[in-house]
């Protein structure tokens, strides 16, 4: 039996929610089989939703889905190098998002700094980045420079999303801003986990939950945006 489009959409949403719950539970309580299986289906369920709902397909977001899927699988590895490879895959996600936002801005970024809101946002994001790097500084060792650059890209993309929203205030751009901001927080907690070695169960829960929320919000942005070419 072939499902109708509305039923396919419902199925993709159900698959995403189920995969998300299993992903969080499996990750928190060490159920490796559940964790791996749910990770395999998490991003594809979002991709299914995107291709069903979006009228115009966006190449950048298609690549974001691919990098997110690869990164999610690599981070599951218990070896440090594979986990770092997963972080690099998410680096691709960040760069694609930053490039997309820059293309959507009506006013060049340099001129955006004439606005007080842009300067305040820049200072807040810079303080956040410095705080995270300070917490990690004793544990980074030879990774200090690549992680610093990664952090600049990650937090910089969050900054761009606030600039974008302040320039063009609408619900769609707010969704993107929330999606990127939650991705930044989730990525920060992941960095603490990778380099400090231990985080609390609550911190790990928020890392996983915020990552799922970020993926959903970013997907919803590309579905609803009329200028996401």
Image: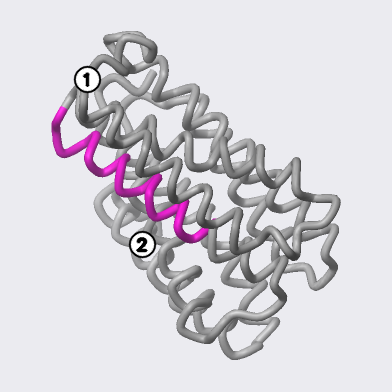
Task: Judge whether 107 appears above or below 127 on screen.
Answer: above
Residue neighbourhood size for the residue with mark 1, other residues' Cα within 10 Å, grouped as few (<14), some (14–19), many (≥20): few
Residue neighbourhood size for the residue with mark 2, other residues' Cα within 10 Å, grouped as few (<14), some (14–19), many (≥20): some
Q: Residue furthest bottom?
A: 29
**Span of residues in magenta:** 169-187
Task: Judge whether 15 appears above or below 143 on screen.
Answer: below
> Closer to the camera, 98 or 143?
143
Residue at the image point whose x is 56% and y is 84% from the top: 28
Horizontal side of 225 relative to 15 (left or right) equals: left
Residue 115 marker: 1
Residue 204 magenta-highlighted: no
Q: For mark 2, what is the residue?
A: 11
> Hey, which quadrant is residue 77 in on the image?
bottom right
> Closer to the camera, 198 or 132?
132
Residue at the image point whose x is 64% and y is 41% from the top: 150
Could you say whether the residue bearing mark 2 is in a helix, strand or loop?
Answer: helix
Residue at the image point whose x is 70% and y is 67% from the top: 194
Horizontal side of 99 relative to 79 (left or right) equals: left
Question: What colour scheme has been applied to the protein in the rendered image?
Answer: one colour
């Amino acid at each position: 039996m072939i499902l109708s489009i509305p039923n396919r959409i419902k199925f993709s949403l159900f698959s995403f929610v189920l995969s998300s719950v299993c992903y969080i539970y499996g990750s928190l309580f060490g159920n490796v089989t559940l964790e791996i299986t749910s990770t395999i289906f998490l991003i594809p369920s979002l991709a299914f939703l995107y291709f069903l709902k979006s009228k115009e397909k966006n190449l950048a977001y298609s690549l974001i889905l691919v990098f997110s899927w690869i990164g999610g699988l690599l981070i599951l590895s218990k070896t440090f190098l594979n986990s770092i490879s997963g972080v690099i895959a998410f680096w691709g996600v960040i760069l694609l998002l930053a490039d997309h936002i820059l293309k959507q801005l009506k006013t060049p970024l340099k001129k955006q700094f004439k606005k007080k809101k842009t300067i305040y946002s820049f200072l807040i994001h810079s303080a956040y980045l410095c705080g995270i790097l300070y917490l990690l500084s004793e544990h980074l060792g030879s990774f200090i420079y690549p992680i610093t650059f990664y952090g600049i890209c990650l937090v910089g993309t969050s900054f761009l999303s606030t600039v974008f929203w302040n320039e063009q205030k609408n619900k769609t751009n707010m969704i993107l801003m929330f999606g990127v901001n939650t991705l930044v927080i989730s990525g920060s907690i992941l960095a603490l986990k990778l380099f400090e070695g231990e985080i609390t169960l609550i911190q790990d829960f928020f890392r996983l939950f915020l990552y799922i929320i970020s993926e959903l919000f970013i997907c919803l942005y590309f579905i609803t945006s009329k200028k996401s070419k």
